[in-house]
Image (cartoon, rainbow, N blue to C red):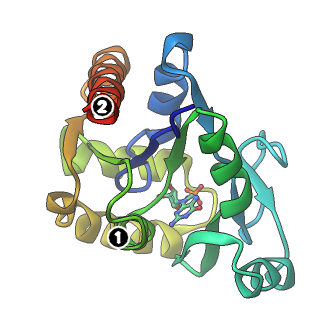
C-alpha cells in the first residue's frame, strides 16, 4: 500500500487554520487523519485534552523530545508545541493522508527533515492584517502582552509564506477549504502517478 501524504496547514496564529482544517476534513474521499499536537500551554475554555491538543507538562514534553518522538517542535509565545512522530508515521504507513496544523518554524523543520518525501505545504493567508488583528484580539484569553506578541509573530510569519508550495487566502471558509481539497486531490493523484512510473 502507498504511504500517505504529509499535509501541512500553516499560517499565522488566528488566521483560522482550525476551522479550515475541519472543513477540509469533511471530504471522506481524501482519507485524512489529523495529528493532534503536544503543547505545554494552558487549556482554553472549550478545549478538550486529546482533541485540540494533548496538554502536557514541561517534563513530559522534554521526555518526548529526548526519546526522539517529535517530528518537529517549536516554542511559540513562551509555550512548547510539537508533533508526535510515532502516530503520524503509523497512520501514513496505513495509507492515511496526515494533516499537521503547525506554525512556520515547525514547517521548516519538516521540510528540511523529509526533503524527498511526499510533503504538501500550504500557507493560509488572512485577507488583510487588520482582519487578522481583530481575530487575534477576539480570541486571545492571555492578555494584551500576549496579543502584541502574537501580532508581531504573525507579521513575521506572513513574510515567510514563500517557503510553502501553496498559499491560500482565507477570504471565506467554504472557498478556502474547497481550494485546499482541490490541492490535496491533485497531490494524491501526482503521488499515485509517480508510483506507477
Ligand atoms: P495556539 O496556542 O493558538 O493553539 O497555537 C499557537 C501556534 O502554534 C499556532 O500557529 C498553531 O498552529 C501552532 N502549533 C500547534 N501545534 C503545533 C505543533 O505541533 N508544532 C508547531 N510547530 N506549531 C504548532
Up-down relation of residue 58 to residue 150 (above or below): below
x and y, in percent, of residue 137 in the image: 45, 52
Within 8 Å of ligand 1, the CB of disc 1? no
Q: Nearer the viewer, residue 150 or 134?
A: 150
* Residue 43 visible at all: no
Q: Residue drawn at (66%, 35%), measured in percent from left and top?
A: 94
Side of 11 where 43 appears, left or right: right
Q: Which residue is mark 2?
A: 187
Disc nearest the viewer among 2 and 1? 2
Farthest-out residue, front: 197
Secondary structure under the numbered disc 1 in the rendered image: helix
Q: Which residue is mark 1?
A: 108
Q: Nearer the viewer, residue 116 or 64?
A: 116
Badge 2: residue crowd in 10 Å (few <14, some 14–19, many ≥20): some
Q: Residue drawn at (84%, 49%), measured in percent from left and top?
A: 49
| Image quadrant occupied by the C terminus | top left
Side of 78 where 148 appears, left or right: left
> Dots 2 and 1: beta carbons under 8 Å?
no
Ligand 1 sits in which quadrant?
bottom right
Up-down relation of residue 163 to residue 171 (above or below): below
Earlier-in-chain disc, 2 versus 1: 1
Up-down relation of residue 140 to residue 174 (above or below): below
* Residue 144 visible at all: yes
Badge 1: residue crowd in 10 Å (few <14, some 14–19, many ≥20): some
Q: Residue drawn at (36%, 45%), measured in percent from left and top?
A: 134
- Badge number at residue 49: none
x and y, in percent, of residue 187 in the image: 30, 31
Amino acid at each position: 500500500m502507498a504511504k500517505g501524504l504529509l499535509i501541512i496547514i500553516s499560517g499565522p496564529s488566528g488566521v483560522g487554520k482550525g476551522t479550515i482544517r475541519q472543513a477540509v476534513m469533511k471530504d471522506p474521499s481524501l482519507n485524512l487523519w489529523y495529528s493532534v499536537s503536544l503543547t505545554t500551554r494552558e487549556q482554553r475554555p472549550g478545549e478538550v485534552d486529546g482533541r485540540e491538543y494533548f496538554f502536557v507538562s514541561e517534563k513530559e514534553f522534554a521526555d518526548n523530545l529526548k526519546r526522539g518522538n517529535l517530528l518537529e517542535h517549536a516554542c511559540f509565545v513562551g509555550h512548547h508545541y510539537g508533533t508526535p512522530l510515532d502516530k503520524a508515521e503509523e497512520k501514513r504507513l496505513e495509507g492515511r493522508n496526515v494533516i499537521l496544523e503547525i506554525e512556520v518554524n515547525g514547517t521548516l523543520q519538516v521540510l528540511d527533515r523529509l526533503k524527498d518525501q511526499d510533503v504538501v505545504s500550504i500557507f493560509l493567508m488572512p485577507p488583510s492584517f487588520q482582519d487578522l488583528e481583530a481575530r487575534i484580539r477576539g480570541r486571545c484569553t492571555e492578555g494584551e502582552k500576549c496579543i502584541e506578541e502574537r501580532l508581531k509573530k504573525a507579521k513575521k510569519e506572513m513574510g515567510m509564506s514563500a517557503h510553502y508550495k501553496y498559499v491560500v487566502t482565507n477570504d471565506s471558509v467554504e472557498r478556502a477549504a474547497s481550494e485546499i481539497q482541490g490541492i490535496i486531490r491533485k497531490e494524491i493523484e501526482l503521488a499515485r502517478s509517480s508510483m506507477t512510473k
